[in-house]
Image (spheres, rainbow, N blue to C red):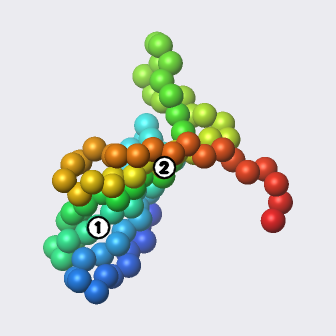
């Protein structure tokens, strides 16, 4: 699976990036982060994904219908996310 990537140059020489997952076990995720001037992933900002859980005896994640999750990397000094938000799917019209 090829990744889809959006790149926005920033004034400090870095780039703001949103990139789809290439892992077939996690196809419904997009990663938001910062690329350095050498195009190497520099810092995680967030992961936005279809919410999922694991079930006993099942190796792959089981995706939750009508739920999304946002993981935020709010502390620049750690590689672990600091906050997570579950968001239900809105079924109304616009």
Residue closest to the far left? 38
Residue that badge 2 annotates: 70
Q: Earlier in the sequence, mark 1 or mark 2?
A: 1
Query: Where is residue 93, by image quadrant?
Result: bottom right
Residues under numbered marks 1 and 2 in contact, where contact means CB atoms less than 8 Å apart: no
**Residue for point 23% across, 83% down:** 12
Residue located 31% across and 82% down the image: 10
Label 1 and label 2: CA atoms lie apart by: 17 Å
Q: Which residue sits at x=40%, y=46%?
A: 83
* Residue 50 locus on image (x, y percent): 55, 44
Q: Judge left or right: residue 77 versus residue 52.
A: left
Front of the two marks 1 and 2? 2
Q: How many marks?
A: 2
When asked about the image quadrant of residue 60, the answer is top left
Q: Whole-percent x and y of residue 1?
A: 43, 51
Circle 1 is placed at which residue position? Answer: 34
Q: Is residue 46 visible?
A: yes
Give the left or right position of residue 44, taking residue 29 as reference. Answer: left
The numbered dot on residue 44 is: none
Q: Residue at x 60, y 46 (%)?
A: 87
| 33 left or right, relative to 55 | left
Residue 59 versus residue 90: which sits nearer the camera? 90
Secondary element type, mark 2: strand
Q: Position of residue 9 (x, y in %)?
A: 33, 82
User: Callout 2 environment at 10 Å: few (<14), some (14 to 19), or many (20+)?
Assistant: many
């Amino acid at each position: 699976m090829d990744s889809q990537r959006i790149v926005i140059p920033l004034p400090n020489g870095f780039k703001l990036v949103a990139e789809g997952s290439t892992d077939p076990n996690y196809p419904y995720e997009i990663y938001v982060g910062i690329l350095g001037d050498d195009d190497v992933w520099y810092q995680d900002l967030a992961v936005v994904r279809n919410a999922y859980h694991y079930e006993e005896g099942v190796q792959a994640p089981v995706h939750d219908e009508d739920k999304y999750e946002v993981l935020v990397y709010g502390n620049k000094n750690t590689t672990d996310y600091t906050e997570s938000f579950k968001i239900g799917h809105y079924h109304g019209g616009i």
